[in-house]
Image (cartoon, helix red, strand yellow):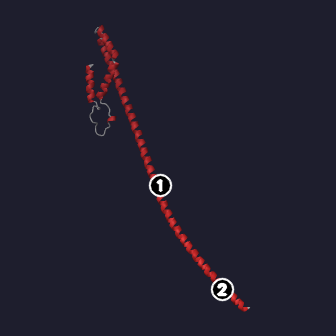
């Protein structure tokens, strides 16, 4: 058992998460354990799963070493099967963890992209409203100036028409007076 513990301590020193910096361009969250670390994990898990075999081996020792040659290969075979199964389970768990992390990273990316698009569209909308406000303000100023000119022109035209009307009225009154004088002289 001490050899397994020393093997485990050596494997933990050689594992990629032992404090060494990650290779440039790699994310430490997505690093996979090395082959040695997976075998160490499988051997540790297999050792716990081998407890009944160890008990049988202890019983065999007590009963005599006559069963040891039979139990040892069977125990080794069982240990190999359990280690292989544990290794496969470890790989599947690691894969599902990586998938969950990738899914979370994708969702985060989409959320941030949506927020940026929303912010950009709001900013563009505000810019459009501001520009439209400027355009309508300029157009209103032009229309106000034009309306003021038209009003002045209309007022001048009314005055001119009024002056012409009064002049024409005066001319007509003078003509009427002249005709009355002529008519009064003929009678």
Say which mark, if any, is on residue 36. Answer: none
- The structure residue drawn at horizontal position 46% and vertical position 56%, both measured from the top left corner, is 130
Between discs 1 and 2, the one toward the N terminus: 1
Question: Which residue is at a point 61% across and 79% down the rendered structure image?
Answer: 166
Please give left or right for residue 136 compared with residue 6 in the image: right
Query: Under tag 2, what secondary structure?
Result: helix
Query: Where is residue 141 shown, x and y percent of the image?
Result: 49, 64
For marks 1 and 2, give the CA distance: 67 Å
Determine whether, in the image, residue 101 is placed left or right of residue 179: left
Q: Nearer the viewer, residue 145 or 34?
A: 145
Quadrant housing the C terminus: bottom right
Where is residue 146 drawn, in percent x and y? Answer: 52, 68
Q: How busy is the neighbourhood of tag 1: few (under 14 within 10 Å), some, or many (20 plus)?
A: few
Where does residue 90 sit, x and y in percent of width and height?
Answer: 35, 27
Q: Is residue 148 above or below residue 112?
A: below
User: Considering only vertical position in the picture, is 80 above or below 103?
Assistant: above
Number of marks drawn: 2
Q: Are discs 1 and 2 less than 8 Å apart at CB?
A: no
- Foreground disc of the pair 1, 2: 2
Query: Which one is in front, 33 or 20?
Result: 20
Mark 1 secondary-structure assignment: helix
Residue shown at 28%/24% (left/top)? 8
- The single residue placed furthest to the bottom in the displayed view is 186
- Location of residue 81 (image quadrant): top left
| Percent of width and height locating residue 29 | 34, 35
How crowded pointer 2 is (Cα within 10 Å; few <14, some 14-19, many 20+) is rated as few
Mark carried by residue 129: 1
Q: Residue furthest top?
A: 63
**Position of residue 55 in the picture relative to residue 159 (left or right):** left
The residue indicated by pointer 2 is 175
Give the residue at the far right of this rendering: 187
């Amino acid at each position: 058992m001490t050899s397994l513990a020393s093997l485990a301590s050596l494997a933990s020193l050689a594992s990629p998460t032992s404090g060494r910096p990650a290779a440039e361009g790699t994310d430490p969250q997505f690093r996979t354990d090395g082959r040695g670390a997976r075998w160490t994990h499988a051997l540790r898990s297999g050792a716990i799963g081998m407890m009944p075999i160890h008990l049988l081996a202890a019983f065999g020792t007590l009963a005599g070493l006559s069963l040891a040659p039979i139990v040892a290969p069977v125990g080794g075979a069982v240990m190999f099967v359990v280690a292989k199964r544990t290794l496969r389970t470890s790989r599947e768990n690691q894969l599902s963890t990586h998938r969950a992390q990738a899914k979370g990273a994708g969702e985060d990316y989409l959320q941030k992209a949506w927020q940026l698009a929303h912010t950009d569209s709001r900013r563009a909308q505000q810019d459009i409203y501001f520009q439209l406000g400027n355009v309508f303000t300029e157009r209103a100023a032009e229309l106000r100036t034009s309306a003021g000119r038209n009003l002045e022109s209309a007022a001048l035209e009314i005055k001119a028409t009024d002056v012409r009307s009064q002049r024409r009225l005066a001319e007509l009154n003078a003509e009427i007076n002249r005709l009355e004088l002529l008519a009064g002289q003929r009678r």
